Image: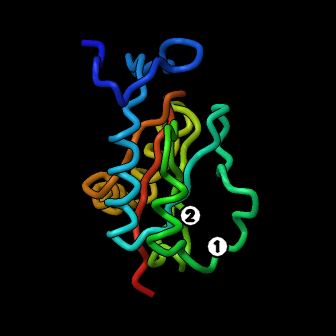
Amino acid sequence: MTPTHEDTAPLKGGELTGTGLTHVDFALIRQTAHDAYAAGLCVLPAADDGSKRPAVAKWGNYQTARPDKKTMTRLFAGDRHGLGVVCGAVSGNLEMFEFDSAPAEELFRELAAITGLSTLLECLDRGYSERTPGGGLHWLYRLTE
């Protein structure tokens, strides 16, 4: 079903490849950004051009300090098409392991099984993961040391 809420807009170029999504829910993006911020993550808006780059002029500062609440509200005011999380110490030692394609993930899983690391992959699979529009995979996890 196509969203009809006034806080949505058609995606540029139609459907987001492989997702079935045709509209952006701006309110959901804002809420997700604020929820991630409340969880201790350093969240920045993504550029609206479809790239993965942050939509801030100088994002290097955010590699060591999260924006304050006032700045977060300003950064996510209006119609933002996406968000990103800065990994590392600034986000509580969050790390991301990324596969760019399903074949790369499959090979990694095969090699992990051969080398006795299947239990580790099971732990990662039980945590947070997300599929990318191109068929890749992100595992996100926090380090304790």
Q: Are marks 1 and 2 in contact (CB under 8 Å)?
A: yes
Q: Going by the image, does 128 lie left or right of 93?
A: left
Residue 15: numbered disc: none
Q: Residue 102's spot in the image, x, y percent?
A: 50, 31
Q: Which residue is mark 1?
A: 63
Q: Secondary structure at mark 1?
A: helix
The first of marks 1 and 2 along the sequence is 1
Q: Residue 26's spot in the image, x, y percent?
A: 40, 37
Query: 131 or 23, which is in the foreground?
Result: 23
Residue at 48 percent across and 49 percent down: it is: 77
Q: Residue 103's spot in the image, x, y percent?
A: 53, 31
Which residue type carries mark 1? Gln
Residue at 67 percent across and 37 percent down: it is: 51
Residue at 48 percent across and 35 percent down: it is: 132
Q: Which residue is mark 2?
A: 86
Position of residue 102 relative to residue 99, above or below, is above
Query: 31 or 95, which is in the foreground?
Result: 31
